[in-house]
Each structure stands twice: as structure tokens, then as C-alpha cells.
Amino acid sequence: MAVPTDGPFPALPQAIPLAASGPPLGRRPAEYYDRARPDLVRAIPASAQHILDVGCAAGWLGETLRRERPSASVIGVERDPEAAELARARLDRVECLDVEHGPLPFRAGEFDCIVYGDVLEHLVDPWGTLRRHLRHLQPHGAVVLSLPNVRQLGLVLKLAVFGRFEYVTEGVLDATHLRFFTLHEIRKWLDAESLRVERLERTLGFWRIQGRAAVPFGWIPGVRDLFTVRYTVTARR
């Protein structure tokens, strides 16, 4: 959950010049690849037994799933060689490759759940990538997506009022993000792929009002989306 702020806008990480991120752009510290994501664990259907974790990083998600569901198998795909090597000690199998270049080395219909935890926004063509990967999903399988929300009120106000659209080291405007999404666009995308949303979880970035974390006017339809930092969506064929 995002850290509350006493200022007029939800806090964002400090903006950085793009050149400061170094080659490759936005190179991550080691701990970035081993962060806990309980929202992803909650989003994966309890019935899932053959799970593909696309962008598995160092394998935290798969390790958690294998501990909680001993009968489940988790296969990972990761393009960072160091993270992939760490994940191999945690998952049943890990392929080190770039998902946008070439097919995946898996059978058609091999998985009953495919997970994209903060991955698709980093791709040049996330739409084509998801479509290609769906051939590996079983007929009634599920897809779990975690995507940042560019409609977050702090970003909208900074752009509309101050003309600022500053890339940062981490967050919705992460310097490595190539694509940006709202909930409307996520739903439209999934609908085009004949995927029905069956679960939606919001990670909220609160404001502080009289010292307490709150979402102002949160009872009004649509307002909570303005305070949403990230959506975690489960969709099924």
C-alpha cells in the first residue's frame, strides 16, 4: 500500500533525469527482484495447479505458491540472467528469455493460470505478447495481471495544473514503463481477448485528512480509481 502524504498531492518518487538511470535504463537493485506481492498470491485462483509466472524475477511468488500449494507446479520466465538464476532454486523450471522475441518453449494449453506481475507495462507490444501467450492457457484458464494506473489523481493534477510528466526511479511513471493503462482500457483489452474479469483488487495511495489516511469522497462511483496506484486483475476464459 502506498505511503500516505500530508501534502496536497499523493507522494511520488523523486524525479530523475533519464540519463541518470544508466545502461540499461532503469537497472534495478538486487532487492527489486525479490519483493513480496501478496496481492498476486490472492489473485491466483485456488484451483490453479500449473502456473506460468511471466517476469518471475527472483521467484518469490512461485516459492510462496509452492509452499502454500505443495501440489502446484510453477514455471517462470525471466529475462534478467541474475534474477533467473536465483529463481531456479525456487521454481520447478525457469526459462531466461525475452518474451517479446520468439515463442515460449511450452506446449499449447499447458497452464491453467498465467501471471503477469508488473510486466506488461514494460513491453513494446503487451497486446500482441498476451495474445501469443494465450495459446498456452487451458480453455477455462485464468490470467492474472498487475498494472499501474495512470489515472491516479496525483499524476493527473501534476500534468493538468503544472504541466509535469516526470519519469521516476520507481512507481507509475517508472522510467522503464513504455505503456500506460486505466481501468477502462484494461477491461477493454481483456474483453477483446475474450477474457472475463472475475476479480479486481486496488492498491490505494491514500491522502491524509486530519492526520488519518483516507480516500476523499470514496463513496462516489469512480473516485476510488483516482486514488488507485495499481490494479491486480484476475480474468478467465
Image (cartoon, rainbow, N blue to C red):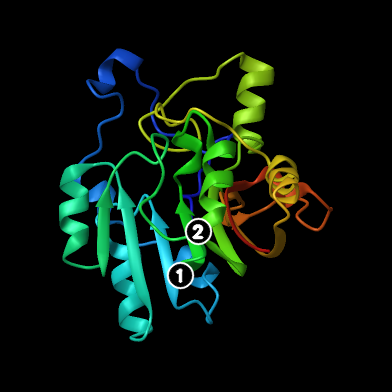
Say whether disc 1 or disc 2 marks the residue closer to the N-terminus.
1
**Is 111 positioned to the left or the right of 229 in the image?**
left
Camera-nearest residue between 61 and 115? 115
Q: Residues within 10 Å of mark 2 (few under 14, many from 20)?
A: many
Q: Nearer the viewer, mark 1 or mark 2?
A: 2
**Is 114 positioned to the left or the right of 185 in the image?**
left
What residue do we see at 40% from left, 59% from top? 53
What residue do we see at 54% from left, 62% from top? 137
Coordinates of residue 28 in the picture (x, y in percent): 25, 37
Camera-nearest residue between 217 and 73? 73
Coordinates of residue 84 in the picture (x, y in percent): 21, 51
User: Which quarter of the figure is the C terminus placed in?
Assistant: bottom right
Relative to 195, is 151 above or below? above
Amino acid marked by disc 2: His
- Residue 41 - label: 1
Q: Residues within 10 Å of mark 1 (few under 14, many from 20)?
A: some
Residue position for label 2: 136
**Is 37 positioned to the left or the right of 165 in the image?**
left
Coordinates of residue 192 in the picture (x, y in percent): 74, 45
**Is 118 positioned to the left or the right of 128 in the image?**
left
Camera-nearest residue between 165 and 82? 82
Coordinates of residue 107 in the picture (x, y in percent): 43, 61
